[in-house]
Image (cartoon, grey):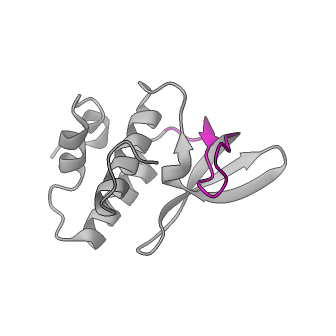
Amino acid sequence: MFGFEEVIEIPDQQERIQEVTVDCNGQSEELSAMEVYLMETPTYPFAAIWRDPDEPGHAEAVTVLDFGTSDERRGVSLDVQWGDKKRRVLAEQIRVDDETSPNAIILSDYRYWVNELNGLSPGYG
């Protein structure tokens, strides 16, 4: 198994996700692996866009401060700030403008994994 720094260098997204979840047995262990991937690999804090799925067209510039929490029902959340407000939002709702940056790749991998888990097309969300 690679370290996560090497994983984000793999060009194919499905291969990266397979590498992150290689020793996992079931959804719970995969979530734990993705949690570690999101905890250890991004460089916090970083600038991003939060898209609230309950508000079509919503896009708010935020700073992702740190990893938030993880649970089997809701998945991974991140701590974000915009202005003087702080909130936890689901990781799949966060985008990074520079799609080639390591943080964007990691978030895209997580979003793809969540969509696959929920039977959604890869472009969804």
- Reply above or below: 124 against 74: above
Along the line of sight, which residue is nearer the eye, 77 or 122?
A: 122
* Residue 74 in the image, given as x and y percentages of width and height: 48, 70
Could you tell me which residue is drawn at 36 percent across and 57 percent down?
114
- Measured as percent of width and height from the top left, residue 115 is found at 35, 55
Main SS of the magenta part reads loop
91 vs 59, left or right, is left
Name the image quarter holding residue 100: top left
Say whether residue 6 is visible: yes
Magenta region includes residue 44: yes
| Image location of residue 6, percent across then percent down | 25, 34
| Residue sitting nearer the eye, 69 or 12 | 12
| Residue that sits furthest to the front in the current view | 56
Residue 36 shown left or right of residue 78 in the figure: left
Tag count:
0
- Does 13 appear in magenta? no
Residue 46 visible, this orientation: no
The residue drawn where x is 66% and y is 50% is 80
Residue 2, image x and y in percent? Answer: 19, 42
Residue 115, placed above or below residue 42: below
In this view, 45 is above or below 93:
above
Q: Which residues are magenta?
A: 43-60
- Relative depth, front residue between 32 and 99: 99
Residue depicted at x 34% and y 48%: 112
In this rendering, would 91 be left or right of 58?
A: left
Name the residue located 16 percent from the left edge and 70 percent from the top edge.
25
Towards the viewer: 41 or 115? 115
